[in-house]
Image (tube, helix red, strand yellow):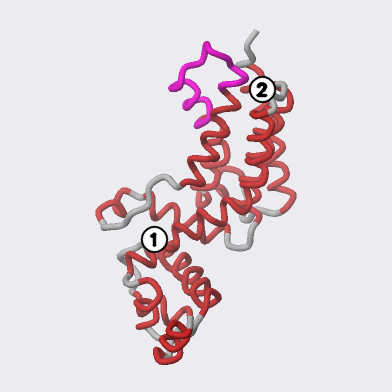
Amino acid sequence: MTSLRRRNAESGYPRGEETKTKIIRKAITLFGEKGFAGVSTREIASAAGVPPPSLQYYFENKEGLYQACIEDIHASAWDAIGPVARDVEDLLAANADADRLIDGYCRILEALADFLFATPDAATRALFIAQHQAPSSRTTNKSGGKSATGRRIRDCCAAVVSRIGGPRLGDEEISVVCTTINGQLVVVHLARQHIEDWMGWKEFTTERIETLKAVVRRQTMVILNSYRST
């Protein structure tokens, strides 16, 4: 611990998780606006108000910072959705009935909607994700496959569909059902630039988010009820 303090003091760089978080937040914004190749570490450092060498000190290189941005988004997603997902996992373990499982799935989607649209940095995260998934971004040397958070939420949703549908549903059909249900929110999230044209929404107000959640819940209930085993 003493050597770490000495290293921090001698480096002259800002210290602590607060500074790292500040750099990551600015990087998410700039990567989202300009893409991985379109922004320099010097530009990110300037926006974060830190010396340029501090990015290397904290993240080693630009790729390390980019990966830290991905991990930060995953962690924030689990903070928002994890408590509900754990509740649904408990329902599955307790062999809860279909009505409670369907309600649990809907609550996962509602938590996801709040994360995607209601948090202050939701729009900048959306831009980052859109850039990350663009075909041109795949030519750069950046990692970022499916996260443990994404897998756990996906597996929880799949388990609900499997329990409701019974043995007549195969793994591939279960995956398609979950993708279709969850895609209700994902398409809105990734198509933000078209939302004004499609729905006339210039911003996601609280009332509009609640409308979206209500519609998604109704549609999800219809889909899941249609798969109830008899």
Quarter that holds the C terminus: top right
- Horizontally, residue 52 falls left or right of residue 141, namely right
Q: Is residue 216 above or below residue 123?
A: above
Residue 49 visible, this orientation: no
Image point 64% across, 39% down: which residue?
108
Q: Viewed as shown, does residue 66 lie left or right of 136?
A: right
**In this picture, which residue range is highlighted in magenta?**
162-179
**Residue in the foreground of this view, choosing between 98 and 126:** 98
Q: Is any atom of residue 66 visible in this view?
A: yes
Q: Secondary structure at mark 2?
A: helix
Q: Is residue 211 shown above or below 78?
A: above
Q: Where is mark 1, residue-wise?
A: 67
Residue 222: assigned label: 2
The structure residue drawn at horizontal position 54% and vertical position 29%, both measured from the top left corner, is: 158
Q: Earlier in the sequence, mark 1 or mark 2?
A: 1
Q: Nearer the viewer, residue 156 or 222?
A: 156
Residue 206 placement (x, y as % from top left)? 73, 53
Q: Residue 99, located in which quarter of the rendered image?
A: top right
Estimate the x, y position of residue 189 in percent, counting from the top left: 54, 47
Q: Amino acid at mark 1?
A: Gln
Q: Nearer the viewer, mark 1 or mark 2?
A: 1
Instruction: Give the camera-side residue of 217 and 144.
Output: 144
Contact check, label 1 and label 2, Cβ < 8 Å: no
78 up-or-down from 165: above or below: below
Q: Position of residue 184 (x, y in %)?
A: 57, 36
Q: Look at 67% across and 42% down and name the residue there.
A: 84
